[in-house]
Amino acid sequence: MDKVWWTKVTNASHFLDKIVDTVQNGQSIILQLPDTIPWYETMKEIVETRIEGQNPTRSYRYIEDMVEDPGEYLFFEFCKKEKRVHYRPGIGYAEFLAKNEDIVLTDSILWIAKTSEESLIKWAKLIEDYNKALGKHKRGCIFIVEARTPAGAGIKEKKGLRNISYTREIGHYDNYLFNVLATSSSSEKEIFKQYLAEVVSIMLPDDIELSALCIERGKAFLEDPLSVIREIANTEARSDGRDFGTDIREEDLQERLWEAQIKVIFPLVERQRNVLVQKYQKEIEGLLPIVVDYRERVFEASEVELGILSYLAGSGQIQMQYEDVEKLNRLKNARNVLAHIRTLPQEEVDGIFAL
């Protein structure tokens, strides 16, 4: 599923394109990532492979940030002893590194990962000062600095420094598209797969890895979403080894399930109502106009709702076949449940799908 997300979902793939293209343009990046970014290692490997393939004359290095002073770190990491003796505190690390073009740093691409809020600000300041000292059209180090905190959004873009945000590039539709692709291998009917993708997308709008595992559970998830989510949280781990911590309340899940049922089930109910109306259209037209609640009159057969249809069949004014009466009762019950902001059990949903 990791490759499906990062290579088949359009905006997720374009997000990686933007990172690679920005590096190709010689610009550094503040890379804003959510804490639950899906399949981080896969994303990193794809980007690294493409960057290294397109930059054979540059060295690439991935660094997990654990440094107090970024300038000092780069100074000792990339300057040999005989170079360091020429450093004077008054010049500052950024300018010293930029002016010494013969050091390895000049031809490097550095991915600085897992920065804290404090460290992120320091790296952004170093890059700004480094680029200023570097001057126009001069080759220098390209930085990709990961931001897992809201502070990343507050760092303004400057010449040579772009701000690329996962949440700005990737939205709910991308999550839904992934869920549709994830259900495609199922042997269930198309309407079931559409419903499963819709339910997972609405219930778990921002957690792709959890969505993928819920889709794997299929009908078991639809029958009891909260239990399945808890089971996953107790037995599975994210691709980065962290727990699937979730604080979703049962009330919230029920509300989201209802929203999904309104989007998928309600149109099916209406479609089947129309099928019944067309089947018994002549009998209905013979009874028009039909008085509704002693106030409103229905003049067109197409306007006959399930409640009226049920009344006409129950009072014997329409002779409806037994299987159609069963269908009508199922549709009416589903409509009433959804209209009162309650959810249908999966058994009833399956019944609607079978009509």
Image: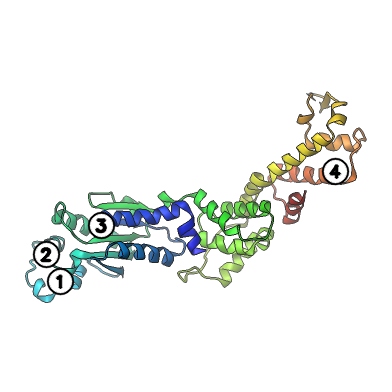
Q: Label 3's element?
A: helix
Q: Earlier in the sequence, mark 3 or mark 1?
A: 1
> What residue would you read off at disc 2?
100
Disc 4 residue type (three-letter): Asp
Task: Say whether residue 87 is left or right of residue 289.
Answer: left
* Residue 167, percent from left and from top: 42, 52
Residue furthest bottom as drawn: 81
Disc 3 residue type (three-letter): Ala
Determine the CA span between mark 3 and mark 1: 21 Å
* Residue 44, percent from left and from top: 38, 65
Q: Label 2's element?
A: loop
> What residue would you read off at disc 4?
324
For the residues bearing labels 4 and 1, Cβ distance under 8 angstroms: no
Q: Earlier in the sequence, mark 4 or mark 2?
A: 2
> What residue would you read off at disc 1?
79
Q: Residue at x 57, y 59 (%)?
A: 182
Determine the CA span between mark 4 and mark 1: 83 Å
For the residues bearing labels 3 and 1, Cβ distance under 8 angstroms: no
Mark 4, mark 1: which one is toward the viewer?
4
Q: Is residue 296 above or below residue 199?
A: above
For the residues bearing labels 1 and 2, Cβ distance under 8 angstroms: yes
